[in-house]
Amino acid sequence: MEGKRSEKVADLIRKEVSEMFVKTVRDPRIGLITITRVTVTGDCRLARIHFSVPGSVEEREKAMKGLDSAKGYIRKELARRVNLRYTPEILFEFDPSIEYAIHIGEVLQSLQKEREENPDEN
């Protein structure tokens, strides 16, 4: 039962933080950020918010600095919006899965293109 509660809390946090990024967080360093998932510990005292940012490593580092500076505001706003006994500490973590998926797609496209250009080698 405890795992189901933490999953519900994680979904609620993901929804609320995503909405904050769209409506109230105005840090230009954050830009186009996507929250890929949120994991919450069993006692709901720590929330790991996994995010992805399109662009270079510099863009990612800039976004991470913006997220770190907005962390206090986000936690305070979460406490106001979500009715929990304890507002979880927030940790932002970069999620490379979207970049990896794009890379795999590019590799598959190049293999397909190579196969079309050299049909005799198969």
Image: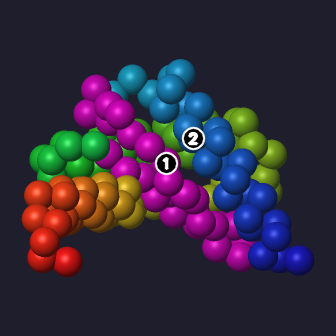
Residue drawn at (78%, 76%) of the image: 3
Q: Which residue is mark 2?
A: 17
50 sits left or right of 5 in the view: left
Residue 64 visible, this angle: yes
At label 2, which amino acid type do we have?
Val
Vertical placement of residue 13 versus 1, above or below:
above
Vertical placement of residue 26 versus 2, above or below:
above
The alpha-carbon separation of the residues under discs 1 and 2 comes to 8 Å
Q: Which mark is residue 35?
A: 1
The numbered mark, 1 or 2, whose residue comes first in the sequence reads: 2
Q: Position of residue 25 (x, y in %)?
A: 45, 28
Q: Does the CB distance between marks 1 and 2 fall below 8 Å?
A: yes
10 Å neighbourhood of mark 2: few (<14), some, or many (≥20)? many
Q: Quadrant of residue 113?
A: bottom left
Q: Which mark is residue 120?
A: none
Q: Quadrant of the N terminus?
A: bottom right
Camera-side residue of 64 and 31: 31
Range of residues picked out in magenta: 28-53
Residue 65 visible, this angle: no
Element class at badge 1: strand
75 sits left or right of 122 in the view: right
Camera-side residue of 70 and 63: 63
27 sits left or right of 34 in the view: left
Q: Quadrant of the C terminus?
A: bottom left
Magenta stretch holds residue 61? no
Magenta stretch holds residue 32? yes
Element class at badge 2: helix
How many numbered marks does the figure carry?
2
Q: Quadrant of residue 46?
A: bottom right
Residue drawn at (15%, 47%) of the image: 56
